[in-house]
Amino acid sequence: MTPRRVVLLTAVLSAAAFVLPETAAVASAPHGTPGSVGSGDPYFPRQGNGGYDVSHYRLAVHYVPGTKRLSGVAHVTARATMTLSRFDLDLRGNLHVSSVRVNGHRAAYRQPKKLVQELVITPRHALRAGRRFHVTVHYAGTARPVTDPDGSLDGFIPTDDGAFVASEPQGAPTWYPVNDTPRDKATYAVSITVPKGLTAVSNGALTGRHAHGRLVTWSWALHQRVSSYLVTATLGRFAVSRGRTSSGVPYLTAVDPREAAAKPVLKQLPAIVDYFSKVYGRYPFGQAGAIVDHAHKVGYALETATRPLFDRAPDVATLSHELAHQWYGDDVTVAKWRDIWLNEGFAEFSSWLYTEHTGGQTTAQHLATLLANPASDSDEWLPPPGNPGSGKGIFADSVYDRGAGTLAALRQLVGDRTFFAIMRGWLPAHRYGNATVGQFTAFAQRVAHRNLTHFFYEWLYKNGKPTG
Ligand code: ARG
Ligand code: ZN
């Protein structure tokens, strides 16, 4: 090779170095496009992200109650649904990210203040449509819940002895990086490190408890796919006990000793699980149970998957409501928050049904009591359960009461045989998935072989008391 040719080749190569990245990128490593900032829920527009689908979260979190310091490492396994140059996870800004790796390579990231809960990740290489990828995020900060449009605390809520972790509808990003849409269901392995003497409870099976120095790590694994709002990492002083229902479902309860009133109520847990298994079909998860904390400022309970969470000792109606959600809410989940009736109306109706089963008021009597409320009593009737209007309305009394009344009225209209065929058939049709109110009403019509348009209009959508 002559010196002249070397120079020439260098010139060509450096020119190529300038030009090539683009052309080469198109040929072998596509640029891709950024995934969207939300997932299109009009009530919570920043929730969720576009361009990928998570299959598994492996979370290791550490919480120090004394300082409220929350730190964690999240391993997220996902599949790109389009070729991505960039994508977001949802994580609140009080949790500062210190490193992000994508497929083992350091990735660039930002947490723009004005985007509130977006962790914007730019991987070294575009992520190809259809391919699996792995993200590891290290983060830490002072724990802080969010306040929902209805004024309730949501997410990682510090308590006097630990934390109450309830994330419906938008709390998950207060404790882990997540594609926070109810439509992206995933399996979970959660381990929680706390000071010795405290118990940390998540979903599914207890897979380990390891003491190291002054700390203890509790590990849990959930093998069925669930929505992000149904995952918990509640910790504090708890007495743990275990058992099996008559039909063989293992259960674990964790009860704050200050809520001893829970004991006699929890005695009914196995019977409730078995009763709903009988009327609705097999229990959807491998474990059952309950977590009863002493966290009265929260003011609500949540149907965390496999193990519902209570802010105080529940009564039987509340316990059966949350257990029924394992079928209606946790197995079959809303596609959008506007569909909340599929969760709350069904769980509340189920609690009426359990009351009837144990010799109390029938669902027909409950319905008559509901209908005795005058049309002027707007809290009972508005917003209509099929269209609660905004994030503020999703947990309104009418969604629960008029929502349960809808099913009690349907039962009367079509009779028990058809009604329970609808309730049971609905589940396998959407197992571990999501559904809309429109899909349910269409399904009910098909099973009942009759036009129910007017009925559902009156009960679910009319802007006032239905004509019963
Ligand atoms: N789904 C819960 C229940 O069983 C209610 C959650 C209320 N959450 C809230 N942020 N207001 O009824
Ligand atoms: Zn509920």
Image (tube, grey):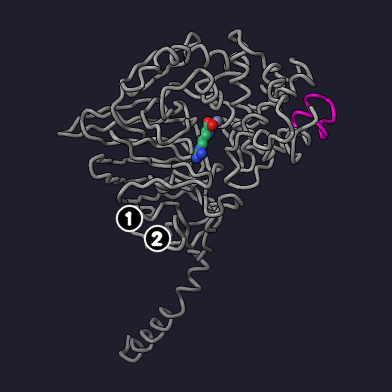
Q: Residue at x 71, y 17 (%)?
A: 364
Within 10 Å of the Cα at label 1, are there few (<14), some (14-19), or many (20+) other Cα atoms?
A: some
* 88 lies left or right of 160: right
Q: Residue at x 38, y 84 (%)?
A: 9
Q: Residue furthest left?
A: 213
Within 10 Å of the Cα at label 2, are there few (<14), some (14-19), or many (20+) other Cα atoms?
A: many
Magenta residues, as a range?
443-455
Task: Report the residue marked by disc 1.
Answer: 96
Q: Quadrant of the N terminus?
A: bottom left
Q: Determine whether the beta carbon of the residue marked 2 sits less than 8 angstroms from the nearest atom of ligand 1.
A: no
N-term mark: 2 or 1:
1
Q: Label 1 is placed on what type of residue? A: His
Across and down, in percent, residue 385 comes to: 67, 37
* 449 lies left or right of 362: right
Is residue 81 among the parts visible in the rendering?
A: yes
Determine if the magenta segment contains residue 337. no
Is residue 97 positioned above or below 61 on the image? below
Along the line of sight, the residue nearer the viewer: 197 or 429: 197
Tally the numbered discs.
2
Q: Label 2 is placed on what type of residue? A: Gln
Majority SS type along the magenta span: helix
Label 2 sits on a secondary structure element that is loop
Q: Quadrant of residue 202?
A: top left
Task: Report the residue marked by disc 2.
Answer: 111
What is the number of the mark on residue 39?
A: none
Q: Quadrant of the C terminus?
A: top right
Is residue 330 among the parts visible in the rendering?
A: no
Along the line of sight, the residue nearer the viewer: 416 or 384: 384
Kindly check if marks 2 and 1 are in contact, taking CB atoms under 8 A apart as contact: yes
Q: Quadrant of residue 5?
A: bottom left
- Residues at marks 2 and 1, CA–CA distance in whole angstroms: 8 Å
